[in-house]
Amino acid sequence: MRSSLVIILILSISLPLYSENIVLKLDLEIGEPNDIIFDRLIDIATDSKNDIYVLDRKEKVIYKFRENGTFLRKIGRAGQGPGEFSGPCSIYIDSRDSIYVLDDLNRRIEVFNKDCACINTIRIINFPIGNSKRIVVDNNNNIYISGYYPNMNSILVKYSPKGGILKKYELPIFEYAGIAFDDPGKRIVNQYLVGGSSCVDDNDKLYVSYSWPYLIKVISAEGNEMHQINGKADYSWTPFIYKTNEINGMLFSESTRTIKIFLMKNGYFVNSIYVKDWEGNPKRILDMSILRKNPESYYKIKGEYAVLDFYSKEGKIVYSARINNKIYFLCSDKKGRILGVKLDDSDFPKVVRYNVDII
């Protein structure tokens, strides 16, 4: 069994100054508790006590930890009944410590109270596709589910507390579509926007981030776009373009992408990005039939790292931090610390938490 709990204060990162100087320090690392094996840790949330809730999609369960990393209990189990999961993909905890779990395979939301008892099941008829689906809830218990809705030209839909559609946010879709090649099959390239992420502030203002490309939209509580942020970065956001015998190909998954956007207690919002640093030109055209058999002939990963871009509520970038580990940052707690999932060299996951000092 791998280590269960390690507390460390060893990592400090201070990068080029923007309008603020931000230092990150690792203060908590949670490994596997006794008799539990972490598998696919896909999302994290925290409550008003800063207890930590970790969603494991493969094991179909939530692990709850105290603020200090002590394991408390499991929530949920595999199944299709109340409080059970088939494909949990996102977790959100509101101001009353109600726990919302988005389950894409059951096409519903399971709601638990602060005592971790299941109190409601919300059916969702119109469900996004793709690998990245996220849930947030506003002060009126309205639900926002981000993900790719191919028939709505959207990556975000607002639902009522009972699951009815209230609003479709018509956001642009970025594609390389209808590119024909000079061969008899006329293979076509199509890169779909397969997901996104959103967060909502106390005034129900929305911040919506695309998985790809680097694009953030700020939307008022009334649903009007206030402004748009086209992020600038020194790493490539262009995934591989590839040939396929299918009419519609899928976005190549091994690419730089936004993991999640979330709010901090100081009013900043953070865009969490995971970067794949490629050797060579990522815009090369790939033949998928060959790629599946011999991927090393097409590309080599030089490195992988995380980026946290800090923005003011007005959309001005105030700092950008790079962390040279395989970390997926997923949320912030009430003390302004940032939590994520870290993979070691063997891809075993741990939960990590960083203090954020603004100088």
Image: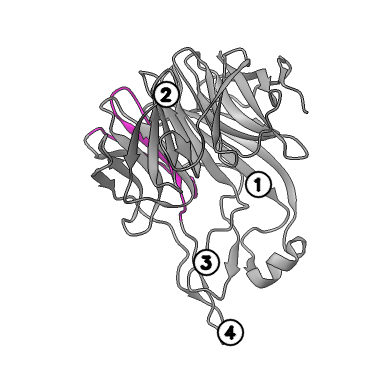
Looking at the image, is mark 4 or mark 2 nearer the viewer? 2
Upstream in sequence: badge 1 or badge 4? 4
Q: CA distance from mark 1 to mark 3?
A: 21 Å
Please, what secondary structure does the residue beneath circle 2 have? loop
Upstream in sequence: badge 4 or badge 2? 2
Upstream in sequence: badge 4 or badge 3? 4
Q: Amino acid at mark 4?
A: Asp
Name the residue that disc number 2 marks: 117
Name the residue that disc number 1 marks: 276
Q: Quadrant of residue 143?
A: top left
Number of numbered discs: 4
Q: Amino acid at mark 3?
A: Gly
Q: Amino acid at mark 2?
A: Ala
- Viewer-proximal residue, 185 or 40? 40
Q: Quadrant of residue 25?
A: top right
Q: Which span is picked out in magenta?
A: 193-221
Mark 4, Cα crowd under 10 Å, few <14 / some 14-19 / many 20+, is few
Magenta-drawn stretch contains 201: yes
Q: Amino acid at mark 1?
A: Lys
Q: Which mark is residue 249?
A: 3
Position of 182 relative to 85 (above/below): below
For residue 36, side relative to residue 213 (left or right):
right
For residue 111, side relative to residue 41 (left or right):
left
